[in-house]
Amino acid sequence: MILIFDYFETLLNSRSMDFNRGLKVFWETYYRDRCSFEEMKSYGEELFGELILKHNEGLEFPFVKEELPLYAEKFGGDVVSLSVEEEADFLMRCNDFELEPGTEDFLIKCSQKDIPMYVLSNSGFGGDALMLILNRFGIGKYFKKLWSSAEFGRIKPDREFFELAISTALSENPNDKREDIIFVGDMYDADVIGAHNAGIKAAWLNKKGGVDTNNLASYEASSIRGLSKFI
């Protein structure tokens, strides 16, 4: 068995999300002499619309690589280059994260059974920053690798994005086959349909009581604790 996890609302829940919490500190650090925060906030909302358009096309809008240069173009000055730590700090300011209840117990159980575990995430933030946040919550050590759509350029359910994780997992675990891989995620369209189209099993964290009308999920639970009975 190989497990590949979604990130947001699967491993980490966001109790609240407000992009402007991160943007305010960014403005104070780099732009307060070039524009008002209201101007930057308004432009951030405009760029959020650009993100939605890109996502509708299956594309990612990487925060550091593509979005930050637009702030420099709009308000002047050099393009800000954030370190991995600064990128992680920005994301954590935007989100009041908490571990999905039961996550660490579940990961410990899988680790004790020598189940290889990976993470495949839709995110405009880089994989190193996402992993750093998992380390801050004490669970990064359980995962062999993490992929973010910020580097890949396309988002789940893109099949090639899934294949990136699948091919690596199988090459690192030659005794396992594609049918041994289970993708764990909460989003039906991105995670369940994406996994099915990539030819692997899906474990659906059905937190909102949705209906698997296409019968694509191999396993279903309302929380990560509920998946323990399948492992």
Image (cartoon, rainbow, N blue to C red):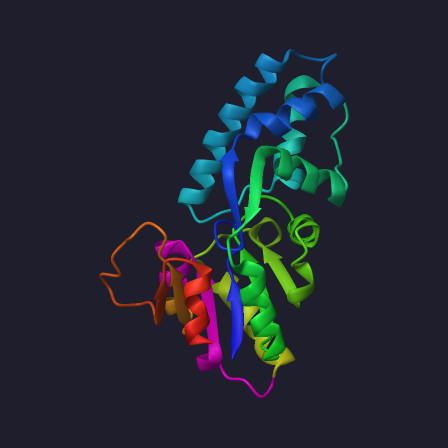
Query: Outermost residue, left direction?
Result: 213
Q: Is residue 208 magenta?
A: no
Question: Where does residue 93 sit, x and y in percent of width and height?
Answer: 63, 33
Q: Nearer the viewer, residue 91 or 126?
A: 91
Marks counted in the figure total 0
Residue 200 at least partly seen: no
Residue 106 lies left or right of residue 142; in this view the side is left
Q: Identify whether 188 is placed above or below 77.
A: below
Q: Nearer the viewer, residue 37 or 99?
A: 99
Residue 18 at least partly seen: yes
Question: Where does residue 11 sit, x and y in percent of width and height?
Answer: 53, 55
Magenta stretch, residue numbers: 174-195
Question: Where does residue 192 sit, x and y in percent of width and height?
Answer: 37, 62
Query: Outermost residue, bottom direction?
Result: 175
Residue under the image location 56 percent in, 45 percent down:
98
Q: Identify whether 220 is placed above or below 167.
A: above
Residue under the image location 26 percent in, 61 percent down:
212
Q: Is residue 192 magenta?
A: yes
Task: Locate residue 66: give its quadrant.
Answer: top right
Task: Locate residue 117: give its quadrant.
Answer: bottom right
Task: Locate residue 82: give its quadrant.
Answer: top right
Q: Identify whether 99 is placed above or below 75.
A: below
Question: Where does residue 61 sit, x and y in percent of width and height?
Answer: 55, 41
Residue 29 lies left or right of residue 65; in this view the side is right
